[in-house]
Image (cartoon, rainbow, N blue to C red):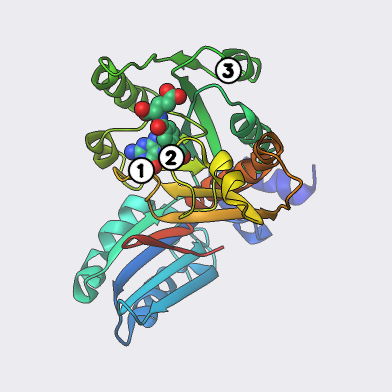
Amino acid sequence: MSNELQERTRSAAPVGQQLAGSGQQATPFVLTVACAERRGIVHAVSSFLAMRGFDIAEHQQFDDHVSNTLFLRTAFTGTLAGTAGNRAGSAASTADSLSADFAEIAGEFGMSYSFHDDRPQRILVMVSKFGHCLNDLIFRWRAGSLGADIAAVVSNHEDLRPMAETAGLPFIHVPVTASTKPQAESRLLELVDEYDADLVVLARYMQVLSDGLCRELHGRAINIHHSFLPGFKGAKPYHQAYERGVKVVGATAHYVTGDLDEGPIIEQEVFRVDHGVDPDSLVTAGRDAEAIALSRAVKWHCQHRVLLNGSRTVVFR
Ligand SMILES: Nc1nc2c(c(=O)[nH]1)N[C@@H](CN(C=O)c1ccc(C(=O)N[C@@H](CCC(=O)O)C(=O)O)cc1)CN2
């Protein structure tokens, strides 16, 4: 251990703070904002951050001239207390404290906004019998490339219990019939709380969620639909695609709403097909497109890169 570090470790200050001089990254935060377009919004945001000693690491914005709305996402990091230009500010900041400090500015501009720290989002994955999307999510989670933590797996069938439990994940079987759907959905909401889930992912979960549940999960439930929406809604899109003779098929990840397969689209993946591809081959080829589109949508949502814009989304990739 270098003399300098020995010197440091003997002092009272916590290690993290001491490493300030060494250029170590401090807590990364993300701010997302949506508000009516007007001059001074970016200046207000950047001044708020600069005055508190924060360094903007990434900034993206979109001026939607159709709805006259500005959307922005700013990723920033603090410089630790005691370092140049920042006596106490950013080091002590939390997402909640920043949110409170920013409220006056947000009120002046009529902003809807959220501050997020770097705590990984926790997801609850819902499945039925098809395991390809769950398998892909587990692979990316274990590889550390999902940008989220899988908290548990919930299913209306037992088929995928081995896949979940082999990955060390809790598996909860919640059977659903037409008569038990209300109880099943109440159980799901209990599980969202029990596992402190930030996001519910319908990874080929083949039950339609009620309007009430969709309202409860507004903006925090993502579904993968196995077609290139708006084409071929419903339960058997690949067979519909085959019958129609389309040359491009794909998959669509979207937020879940009470209107089946109508939720705001986050990501789509497509691939070309020709007359020689039969329905079973479409299903097989479609699995890759579904897994890719869903995992991307989950990662971007959990990195706070997706903002709702009415029935559409703004995605700061
Ligand atoms: N409120 C919503 N719930 C769900 C959506 C959605 O968009 N809004 N997407 C589905 C997934 N899905 C297509 O992507 C889908 C799943 C199931 C069905 C369907 O007709 N299911 C039948 C039962 C089928 C079975 O038991 O195997 C039904 O629920 O009666 C259509 C589309 C997930 N939920």
Amino acid carrying mark 1 in the image: Leu
Q: Which residue is mark 2?
A: 234
Residue 64 coordinates in the image, percent (x, y): 38, 77
- Badge 2 residue CB within 8 Å of ligand 1: yes
Dots 3 and 2: beta carbons under 8 Å? no
User: Is 50 located above or below residue 12 in the figure?
Assistant: below
- Ligand 1 shows up in the quarter that is top left
Left or right, 181 with reference to 233: left
Residue at mark 1 to residue at mark 3: CA–CA distance: 24 Å
Dots 1 and 2: beta carbons under 8 Å? yes
Q: Which residue sits at x=50%, y=43%? A: 225
Closer to viewer: mark 3 or mark 2: 2
User: Is 134 located above or below residue 290 in the figure?
Assistant: above
Q: Which residue sits at x=31%, y=63%? A: 310
User: Is 229 located above or below residue 41 in the figure?
Assistant: above
Q: Which residue sits at x=54%, y=64%? A: 83
Residue at mark 3 to residue at mark 2: CA–CA distance: 23 Å
Secondary structure, mark 2, is loop
Q: Which residue is mark 1?
A: 260
Amino acid carrying mark 3 in the image: Leu
Give the class, few, some or many, for how many residues have Cα within 10 Å of label 1's Cα (few <14, many ≥20).
Answer: some
- Badge 1 residue CB within 8 Å of ligand 1: yes
| Quadrant of residue 197 within the rendered picture | top left
Q: Which residue sits at x=57%, y=62%? A: 317
Closer to viewer: mark 1 or mark 3: 1
Q: Is residue 309 visible?
A: yes
Q: Which residue is mark 3?
A: 160
| Quadrant of residue 257 within the rendered picture | top left
Residue at mark 1 to residue at mark 2: CA–CA distance: 8 Å
